[in-house]
Structure formats: C-alpha cells, structure tokens
Amino acid sequence: MTGVEITSISGVIVVGLGLVATWIKNGRGQSREMGGLKEQVDNIDKKLEDVKTSLDGIRESVDSQRLYCARVSSSHEERIKTLEKGG
C-alpha cells in the first residue's frame, strides 16, 4: 500500500468514528429532550385533573360568573322599569 492509500483509509476511519460519536451524542440529547417533554405532558395532565384548574372547574367558574351577571343585569332592569313607571 502506498502512503496515499493509507492516508485515505485513515481519513475514512476518522470520519466514520466522528459520525458514530455524533450519532451517540445526538441520541443522548434527544433522550433528554424527550424526557423533558414527557415531564411537561405529565404536568399538564396533573393540572387537567386538578379540580380548580380542570376544564370542569373553569366551566363552573364561568357558570357562576354568568349567574352573577344575570342577577346584576336583571336587578338593574327592574330598577330602570320601576323608575320609568314612577316618573
């Protein structure tokens, strides 16, 4: 083998080792990212199961606000009607 062939083969081996090392590094990085995403999804699931922050809790809050607004607006309507009749 000539020096050029040995250099070429050595270069291919170095590049191959570099690719393998990069694949391993990227795989570990993706594993960490996926672990972080899984943790975030688990936290979202916990929040959705919580009574106060769940969709049912939000719906109850909106319904109570709607009832309050209905009471306030109906009392204002009655006051206005009473004033109009009296005036």
Image (cartoon, helix red, strand yellow):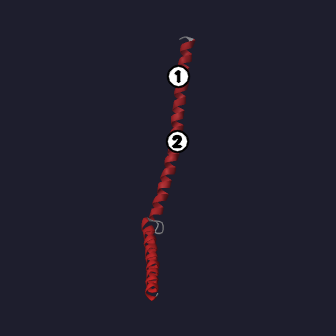
Residue 83 x %, y %: 47, 85
> Which residue lies at the image location 54% right of the left edge and 26% below the top edge?
15
- For the residue marked with disc 1, what is the amino acid? Val
Q: Quadrant of residue 67?
A: bottom left
- Relative to 68, say whether 31 is above or below: above
Secondary-structure class at tag 1: helix
Secondary-structure class at tag 2: helix
Q: Using residue 4 as the reference point, say whether residue 85 is left or right of it.
A: left
- Relative to 63, say whether 41 is above or below: above
- Relative to 19, say whether 27 is above or below: below
Q: Which residue is mark 1?
A: 12
Q: Quadrant of residue 86?
A: bottom left
Distance between mark 2 and mark 1 Cα atoms? 24 Å
Residue 18 x %, y %: 55, 29
CB atoms of marks 2 and 1 within 8 Å: no
Residue 63 x %, y %: 42, 72
Query: In this view of the protein, which residue sits in the foreground, 71 or 79?
Result: 79
Residue 11 x %, y %: 55, 21
Query: In this view of the protein, which residue sits in the foreground, 55 or 40?
Result: 55
Extreme residue in the top direction: 2
> Which residue lies at the image location 50% right of the left edge and 43% below the top edge?
30
> Which residue lies at the image location 56% right of the left edge and 13% below the top edge?
4
- For the residue marked with disc 2, what is the amino acid? Arg
Q: Earlier in the sequence, mark 2 or mark 1?
A: 1
Q: Which residue is mark 2?
A: 28
Extreme residue in the front direction: 87
